[in-house]
Image (cartoon, rainbow, N blue to C red):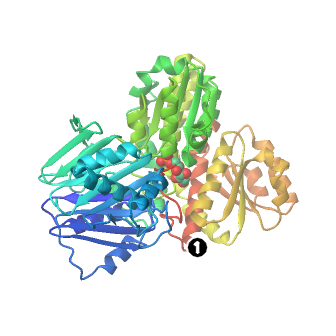
Amino acid sequence: MCGIVAYIGPREAYPVIMKGLKRLEYRGYDSAGVALLEKDLRVYKKQGRVAALEESIIGQDLHAHTGIGHTRWATHGEPSDRNAHPHLSASGRLAMIHNGIIENYTQLKKELTKKGYSFKSDTDTEVLLNFIEDIQENNNCSLEESLRIALKRVTGAYVIVLLDRNHPDTIIAARKGSPLVIGIGKGEHFLASDASPIIEYTKEVVYVNDYELAIIKCDELILKNLGNEKITPFVQKLDLELTAIEKGGYEHFMLKEIFEQPETIFDCLRGRLDVTKGTITMAGVQNNIDKLTNAKRIIIVACGTSWHAGLIAEYIIEEICRIPVEVEYASEFRYRNPVINHGDVIFAISQSGETADTIVAIEKAKEQGAFIFGIVNVVGSSIARISHAGAYTHAGPEIGVASTKAFTAQMVVLIMIALKIAYEKQTLTEDRYIQLLTELQAIPEKVKELLRTSEHIRNLALKYKNVKDALYLGRGNNFPVALEGALKLKEISYIHAEGYPAAEMKHGPIALVDENLPVIFSAPKSFYHEKLVSNIQEIKARKGKVLAVISEGDEVIEKMADDIMTVPLADELISPLLSVIPLQLFACYLGMAKGYDVDKPRNLAKSVTVE
Ligand code: F6R
């Protein structure tokens, strides 16, 4: 989704902004632009990549110490030069960038049109900008004051950043519902949608909260609420290294992130799991253990891949904690007046911590008195801050748009939480508990081992590269793995794919099976083995091609399947941690074989900050 970068200070603003925009490319976008302010205000923008913008303005005057930059992911108005940000106000005095959606922009536009305003773009952003300028002109007040008045009328989500040609020493920003981080340097400030454009300059940051305004000069940062009261900025230290957001020799971030999983899973377990002592240490869980063990019901809210992690957790939590679990798409949950009872606990799962639907779902549940436990990757993100308690997944920055390492880290955290609750509730025998801790500890090594088969998976991707559709099947907690495998293939290779519980196949999808349809089974060793064997036979009898993820040593399925991808043996309860990885690799290699940019799949955004 839209990316925002701004700079004010002694450096040249343009290179800082362009580098920052490139770091935010992973969020997904279709056009880019920059506004530079020195004695005059210059705006350059272009449809397409940041590199195309750069090329188009070679030779222009790019000198300035204050500037704002933007990558746009179209919401109102097609991707085009004229809809790209920054936008200029009618007088040409103000420039603005915006991430989010102004929901009542049609009404505002009508009012402005009546007053004689016309618009150069189709965007809600240009409407808001002129609305702000109109207020300023009619009330003869400061830009800050007019912004405050305007925001009280606005519904929707936004981060906006404004420049005023008459005040080159100031940047004004405001936030509601979309992320904004301010980096504090020596006599300089950096603004961005996340910390990645900032870390090479400073590790001191302030996360702006909803309904806050920031007035930023080289050596001054003032935060205020919409009531014009000053707020003391809470300065935090970033625990992030530059190398973590670079490709480190891999062709693509997605590939790098898949291969990082032995380390990310290890990092997620480190300091938490101790097999010798038989303990799991998670402060967020420990401090709220009564709420968690006494939960009457756990409702998991999430979107996309995070929702799949929630589905896997449902199997595990119900199995070992004996607490009923419901898994909800946040986008549905937020609008359907859900029944929340005393004793319900909400688990909100999100890589970015900024997914708009998940944020609102949490807020709704919070209003009804639910206890919110966030499982989040991005430290300091909105969901981390609005949850009552939580646990970070510690997967490090995930730049590839398709989630991979964050997914396995989410599962690890959810498994540890389930184990901790089960241990406290004594719904698990001591032996089984220790057995599962031991199994979990062994996962990073097993992931390392399975990644050694990557060349084989690359060859399979080449073999299946030209298929038009694929059906993914699994049972038990490997059913959500099938969903995730299908999602990865759709996102990265644009091949139509569907995931189903294997037994449901007979109730419909089997009609699709013929010699052209690959059916991909997530079938590591489990209670369902014999049943899956029957399902595979049913596919083979209809001439379908079977590609199966199996545990090493499974000669039965190996003989039946056309192709196999093997994973090390693991306890069935945690086997999705392994079985999903060949499917991630398969999708990634297939997308690469088709020549697609696997890090930036078309139409997708990394962090979906609008509903
Ligand atoms: C798929 C993917 C998305 C996200 C979803 C939720 O590969 O990445 O489906 O999982 O947009 O995002 P978060 O986890 O940031 O809330």
Residue drawn where x is 56% and y is 59% of the image? 585
Image side of residue 322 versus residue 12, left or right: right
Q: Position of residue 499 (x, y in %)?
A: 70, 51
Rendering coords of residue 417 (x, y %): 50, 29
Q: As rendered, which of 112 and 321 lies closer to the eye?
A: 112
In this view, 494 is above or below 211: below
Front in this rendered view, residue 84 or 564: 84
Image position of 25 with respect to 48: above or below: above
Image vertical order of residue 167 relative to residue 121, above or below: above
**Furthest residue toward right:** 541
Question: Which of these two is toward me, 532 or 601?
Answer: 601
Residue drawn at (55%, 61%) of the image: 454
Q: Quarter-wise, where is residue 205 in the image?
A: top left
Mark 1 Cβ and ligand 1 under 8 Å apart: no
Q: Is residue 72 above or below residue 145?
A: below
Residue 599 can be seen in this image: yes
Q: Locate residue 14 relative to residue 445 in the image: left or right.
A: left
List the single residue furthest toward the bottom.
59
Name the side, left or right, on which 404 lies relative to 546. left
In this view of the protein, which residue sits in the foreground, 307 or 437? 307
- Horizontal side of residue 68 vs 510, given as left or right: left
Quadrant (top left, top right, bottom left, bottom right) of the N terminus: bottom left
Let me know if residue 239 appears in the view.
Answer: no
Residue 429, percent across and down? Answer: 60, 20
Q: Amino acid at mark 1?
A: Lys
The part of the image, by quadrant, that contains residue 459 is bottom right
Q: Tell me the crowding category of disc 1: few under 14, some 14 to 19, or many 20 or more residues within 10 angstroms, Cα based.
A: some
Q: Quadrant of residue 149?
A: top left
Mark 1, residue position:
594
Q: Which secondary structure, mark 1?
A: loop
Q: Position of residue 462 (x, y in %)?
A: 62, 71
